[in-house]
Amino acid sequence: MQYGQIIQQAWEHTKRYKAMWLIGMLVLSSSGGGSGCNIPTGPMDSGNDYSSNWSSSVGQWFEQYWWIVVIAGLVILALAVVAIVLHYIAVGGLFIGAQQARQGHRPKFGDMFLAGLQQAHRTFAVEFLLGLITLGLMIGGLLSIVLLACSIIGLVLVPFALLAWLAGCVAVVLIISVVRLYSLQYLVLQRQGVWASIQHGWQLLRQQLAHSAVIYGLDLLVTVAVGIGLLILMLLVILPFGIVGFIAYAAASWIGLTVSISLGVLLLIGLILIVKGIRNAFSYNLWHLTFTELNK
């Protein structure tokens, strides 16, 4: 397999067919994280009085404007549902677009969207089943550690078992992610059944493990490079708007501060969406070309 040729062709298709950027923006990124903030409390009466007054004010606000919270929650829920539906549409649409690009046809946003819409329920079924398999394997490994801890000798081995479990979880996620990319192409492009596409995706990975690992590593390197580039661009965007906002704040110009922050946020959102669309278009082109080459 000519890895350099595949990467070059994937980039050429991505650069040429910008409609894939648009539909690539709709694909949700699988990321997660959280942050916490612990507010220290001390014995000072003033801090306690402030906390009590603040809690009372918040409680009164919720009692008076509870309907705003309910409406905001429903709007957020509706937006989340729409984003998830668009994700499953975009996944199928991107593979259709990648196939059209490989065949020398120009992918169109409407065609990709409609094709993805027709396959959205099946795309959801594949990703849902693969998610269940991943969760089942992780829970099964964790239960094994719990059973191991029931014996005295097992307690000594629990720390090592936990490390092995964590390494196994990483391996399972990596394997399932590649199986997903192959399975979705069997599903969308070859119109196979849900379970049959998962079986064939797993078989292709087993048969072409080395090539799949190399492509996954290359795709990961591209992701890291894009992430670093995006951070640099974000800093370049934030810096001038931050300076203007600081000047407006120092001059007590709240209109200027609001305009500066608003424009900066909008520009950042647009930049992130464009980079995300290009990144997803390239990745799906790359994996489709790999899928085609491995099935020859």
Image: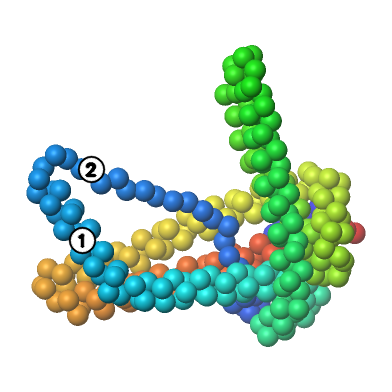
Tell which residue pokes out farthest to the bottom in this image: 110
Tell me the amino acid under the disc marked 1. Answer: Ser
Q: Going by the image, does 118 lie left or right of 48?
A: right
* Residue at image point 76% right, 78% down: 118
Residue at image position (66%, 41%) is 138
Q: Secondary structure at mark 1?
A: helix
Left or right: residue 109 versus residue 78 is right
Residue 191 drawn at (x, y percent): 86, 70
- Which mark, residue 115? none
Crowding near pointer 1: few (<14 within 10 Å), some, many (20+)?
few
Q: Is residue 285 above or below residue 216?
A: below
Report the residue marked by disc 2. 40
Q: Earlier in the sequence, mark 1 or mark 2?
A: 2
Q: Amino acid at mark 2?
A: Pro
Name the residue tied to disc 1. 56
Q: Residue 295 occupies which quadrant of the picture? A: bottom right
Q: Residue furthest right?
A: 296
Quadrant the C terminus occupies: bottom right
Q: Residue at x 78, y 58 (%)?
A: 182
Front residue of this view, candidates 85 and 267: 85
Q: State the CA–CA distance, disc 1 to disc 2.
A: 19 Å
Give me the residue at 58% from left, 57% from top. 30
Left or right of residue 283: residue 2: right
- Residue 27 lies, in percent from the top left, at 61, 68
Q: Nearer the viewer, residue 5 or 34?
A: 34
State the image coordinates of residue 221 (x, y, percent, origin top left). Answer: 59, 51
Q: Is residue 185 visible from the viewing direction of this image? A: yes
x, y percentage for residue 123?
74, 67
In this rendered view, identify the residue nearer to me: 263 or 186. Answer: 186
**Mark 2, other Cα within 10 Å: few <14 / some 14–19 / many ≥20:** few
Kind of element beneath mark 2? loop
Image quadrant in which you'd find residue 248: bottom left
